[in-house]
Image (spheres, coloured by chain):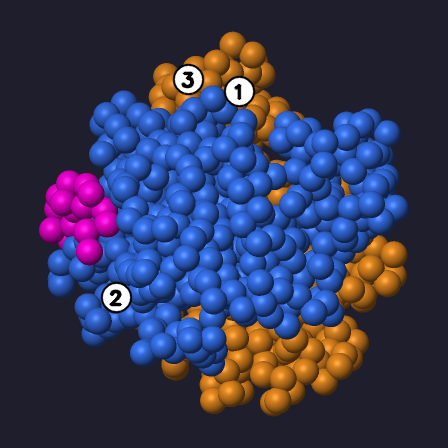
Chain colours: A orange, B blue
Amino acid sequence: MTDFIRNKKQLIEREKVESEARRLALEAMEAALASVNPQHLLRGRLKLEGDFLRIDHLSVDLKEVEGIYVFGGGKASAAMAEALYEVLGDRLTEGIIVAPKYQERAFRTGPIWLVKAGHPIPTVEAPNAVSKMLELADRLGERDLAFCLISGGGSALMASPTGGVSLEEKQDITRALLKSGATIHEINTVRKHLSQVKGGRLAGRIYPAETVGLIISDVVGDSLETIASGPTAPDPTTFRDAVAVLKKYRLWDNAPEAVRKTLEEGVGGLIPESPKPSEEVFRKVHNFILGNNELACRSASEYLNSRGVEASVLTVFLEGEAREAGRVIAAMAKYLKPKPEAKDRSIILGGETTVKVKGEGKGGRNQELVLSACRLIEGVKGLAIAAVDTDGVDGYTEAAGGIVDGYTLSQAREAGLDADFYLQNNDSHSFLDKLGDTIMTGPTGTNVNDLIVAVRVSSEGG
Amino acid sequence: MTDFIRNKKQLIEREKVESEARRLALEAMEAALASVNPQHLLRGRLKLEGDFLRIDHLSVDLKEVEGIYVFGGGKASAAMAEALYEVLGDRLTEGIIVAPKYQERAFRTGPIWLVKAGHPIPTVEAPNAVSKMLELADRLGERDLAFCLISGGGSALMASPTGGVSLEEKQDITRALLKSGATIHEINTVRKHLSQVKGGRLAGRIYPAETVGLIISDVVGDSLETIASGPTAPDPTTFRDAVAVLKKYRLWDNAPEAVRKTLEEGVGGLIPESPKPSEEVFRKVHNFILGNNELACRSASEYLNSRGVEASVLTVFLEGEAREAGRVIAAMAKYLKPKPEAKDRSIILGGETTVKVKGEGKGGRNQELVLSACRLIEGVKGLAIAAVDTDGVDGYTEAAGGIVDGYTLSQAREAGLDADFYLQNNDSHSFLDKLGDTIMTGPTGTNVNDLIVAVRVSSEGG
């Protein structure tokens, strides 16, 4: 078992039965994190056999390939690049990928140039890296092979607006769309038409070389179009659609001059349209989802089963306001009754909740979820509920998530902490931190959204 | 199968596979409603064998009993009284119970006087009935036996403030406490000390006669103190506590004169304290929970099993904002994947959600829950999600709840209905009504909170 959770020992130092529930929940999470570790995923799927590179049904004879190039960006891209270098070594020609600045580990990526850029707010390193990436892509020929290492965070890390649009202007229009009530599909329609990478444009630039997209999904439902805004996925929407969205929400007239100009030039054919599903480009694109939330959930479930714990994955589509999801999950966790004859029991949920921030505190959606949950399970013996963001960074905090049990609320009370007050102030991190109940992993180098595990052990077995 | 749902035929007229999912969900609900039907429950537990009346471990030799009296109130009390009369017939001496005005069915309750009063807003019939009830209780002697038929709604239906406090003043102070952020335990501490019935006071008045409490629970967790504010359950709180609560939330100074006077007289010993757990009274009280939410959930589950559908009761403790619970439940329902080899699958949840009303529409928590849920399951084949209030009255509507499937959202769109708009306006009833998707039972004469059933059938089997 890889020790992803740095403070695991401290988190399980409790009364015996609480300790056992905590240990099982945390170890299930570590099993899940191990299963979606980019190195592990890539090594498991991509095989070099003599001169043949195989992934699932695809087999590439490297004797027929001139150069092997690498592109992409996202929270898992650096680790994927490292693993790709491990597999291909000197056969790699060149590459450029973008990873978040806060990933401090030194990745050994050989000839792949690893650029660090800001996340979640894009910084200038992103467009600079992308223009180098696209220059390189443009040089590729029919007999070249390009890997695109794509994962969550890629939208910001490969932010690179078209034409005269600035990063700030693109962010402004995105914010205005978010406020306007536009759907995520509508927002992406606009963003894909202000980008040099999104909406299949990266694959378009790589063409006529062959593209192999290696993708770790942080999108509920794994839509290729949506993960990192789909650099290697066809885009069915058009410049005309993008203009229509802005007009529908009455944002056109007040949109930055450069945004209007770019979209108008696109409609007029002066900027190429994003590649459409039927285009030749996509006959040379092969996308593979290496890992996703469901894999993490199933791995947690298998781990618990191997420890004699009954486990149900209830969903991989979780959404909704974190504190409310926390109440429903607590209500279900509380009902995991240990029966004399039955095994210990657990439930697992995956997906991505959201937080409408109203307070001034420090927190994240997973920490807020467990803070909310702890209020409903007071006094329940042998029950632990843990939630983490699999990328290791929950909200803007240094924690990956948090863990609570039936005694968290009374411990808080003794420490003079009012759970409701902290929840109202979106201050979940401060609350859990003071109790020593934050889960600390550091950036994990992967990203398959959130994972929630509740384990109930029988008092007798504890 | 009793046909509780009047419009079942209409609700299941769909494409074959949707129809099958809907039928199973609705029939599971009818099985649940049948299992918590008061007549059914009372007949199953209370047995007259010769002169011996038996319920569980309790056996009463009616030859030793002088008179048999009946008291109580709640949504299930009229139906319980009818069943009690069926069992005991002429052996019943006298009684008085209170039921909601909207229950229009004629109940045959023999010598038990059935009073109708307002619910959920108490009306003057309630204190009038209670004073008759207490006069009768005061006349009982050691050799008498009293049944107390208690169920949800009993707090309002047996509203009867102490001393000079008016119904309006008691409601005002309750509302002020609700607004102040006081816990439900604190609110009940005050209410129990302004009541002639709540907090074990009814049992106190019946004493020295023997009390048998027959209770149908609408309280998550079945706390006897909380169901109908516990007319037959000991009250650990005091007048002094009630005053402290009002002072804590700074409501004391502005509380109605009569409220302050009553509580002060209580502290001074001029009004008797509510009976405490250790008191002699409770050696002669026997409370039995006849039915609750868990029984309804299990019955739904057993019914589905009998139809070859895998079923899991996920919780009987559901709480939270209805629309948010709807999202989590939809996320889980969507994950009920039909596998080629697997049986049809279902999930069942019980409890009670809440709605923060912000709009002007017509709705109820169960209808709002499914309206919210339908937005997440668009296009999912063979899936139905239904939610009902088991008392048959969801919110202030004539419907018990509603049902949706993967095609509800597109049908709404065709009909020009915007689901988000109706949800924002708390107008779930209008939305579902226009689609013919409200579940109509009429008042069921019972009350064990809410029941949510999601069924997924495989397309092949449909």
**A147 versus A6 height, above or below:** above
* Of B421 and A283, the residue lying toward us: B421
In the rendered image, which residue does mark 1 sit on? A259
**Label 2: element kind:** helix
- Vertical comparison of B272 with B165: above or below: below
Q: Is residue A150 above or below residue A55?
A: above
Q: Chain of mark 1?
A: A
Q: CA distance from mark 2 to mark 1?
A: 56 Å
Q: Which residues are magenta?
A: B2-19
Q: Which residue is mark 3?
A: A248
Query: In which quadrant will I find the N terminus of chain A?
Result: bottom right
Residue B304 disc label: 2
Three-letter residue code for mark 2:
Leu
**Image quadrant in which you'd find residue B83:** bottom left
Q: Earlier in the sequence, mark 3 or mark 1?
A: 3
Quarter placement of the C terminus of chain A? bottom right
